Amino acid sequence: MNMKYSVAIRTIGTAGEKYDRLLRSIARQTVQPEQVIVVLPEGVSPPSVKYGFERYVYSPKGMVAQRIKALDYITDAYTLFCDDDVELSDNFAELLINALNAGEYSAVSGPLLSFFPPGGMKYAIASLMGSSCVMVFGRKKNYTRILKTGGWSYNRSIMKYPEHIYNADSLAWTCFMIDTEVFKRIHLEHEIWLSSTSYAAYDDQTMFYKLRINGFKIGVIPKAKYLHNDAKTSKATQSATIIYARAFNHYVFWHRFLYLTSKSWPDKAWACICIYYRQLMDNIYNFYLSKHKRRNKQEILAFRHGISDAKKYIKSEEYKSLSSVYCE
């Protein structure tokens, strides 16, 4: 069995104690990594916390660029990608490696139930909008599924069958292990549209769903525990910026990965109905928020401009020149 792996950490150097917890948890792993690559944006100083086993490298600014840059230095079969605010259980890497060595899965992680939307009224609204909803069918086998709206369904009940490995269409990008060569094969660098805005919304969904449609299986191991301490180092300060990016990237993701990959005209028509429904519900929700003073005019306009610019972008020569979503 191949037990060799490297760790790739994406950071901007401000996670502080939470970054320290990550490094300590790496040092406690039952299977130690060959190397730990810490990727920083160009011009950013390394974190003050140092354990001696880290190697610092630099990439152009951007969450996607930092992810990809680590691959320039990694030759091991597997790569454990981490944000700078996660904390791993001692056998985390070992459990993931064993799953990958079994040969069925190409990318695996532990569950992150805190990533799922909260219950109550927000859950009901999200379900009605088609953005996120509790999974109704297939909960014995699946962790997440991508919907034709570009949203997703999720399964909170995975601990009912802790021995299972659950299938997933997408995971949080905070922490996962992947076959290094598979990651290279999907050419995430071709998804340059993710960097069209200043906030890389839908980057995680894009990467994992690209794996999924190319036939690579993604798994979630209930016993592989990790904490997301959430340093919030990547949150943009202006909410209008985030709203614009989410609107733009959501529409491009839907068109590129759900509409264009539909195999028949009825399937394409259904995808169109789903996205029109999603946009209608988004507009109703924005109207409600504005009436209750919870979203200002600038934020409403940011959403509309995001959708409008995305529709223009998918007609552009740059978009048409993008490589196919399918691997060669």
Image (cartoon, rainbow, N blue to C red):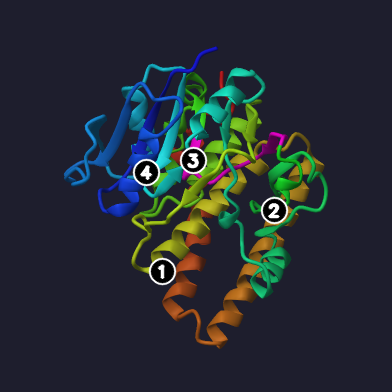
**Looking at the image, is mark 4 or mark 3 nearer the viewer?**
3
Q: Amino acid at mark 2?
A: Arg
Chief SS of the magenta region: loop
Q: Amino acid at mark 1?
A: Ser
**Looking at the image, is mark 1 or mark 2 nearer the viewer?**
2
Does label 2 or label 4 sit earlier along the sequence? Answer: 4
Assess disc 4: are there few (<14), some (14-19) or many (≥20) residues with their C-alpha within 10 Å of its C-alpha: many
Does the magenta segment cover residue 39? no
Name the residue at 45% across, 68% down: 302
Assess disc 2: are there few (<14), some (14-19) or many (≥20) residues with their C-alpha within 10 Å of its C-alpha: some
| Front residue of this view, candidates 152 and 35 | 35
Name the residue at 64% across, 34% down: 219
- Mark 4 and mark 3: Cα distance apart in space: 10 Å
* Residue underneath mark 1: 239
Q: Which mark is residue 139?
A: none
| Front residue of this view, candidates 88 and 187 | 88
Mark 2 in CB contact with mark 4 (< 8 angstroms): no
Does label 4 or label 3 sit earlier along the sequence? Answer: 4
Look at the numbered disc 4 and give the secondary structure of its residue.
helix
Q: Quadrant of residue 245?
A: bottom left
* Residue underneath mark 2: 156
Does label 3 or label 1 sit earlier along the sequence? Answer: 3
**Looking at the image, is mark 4 or mark 1 nearer the viewer?**
4
Q: Position of residue 120 (x, y in %)?
A: 68, 72
* Residue underneath mark 3: 89
* Residue underneath mark 4: 22
Q: Is residue 312 left or right of residue 274?
A: left
Q: Position of residue 314 (x, y in %)?
A: 53, 46
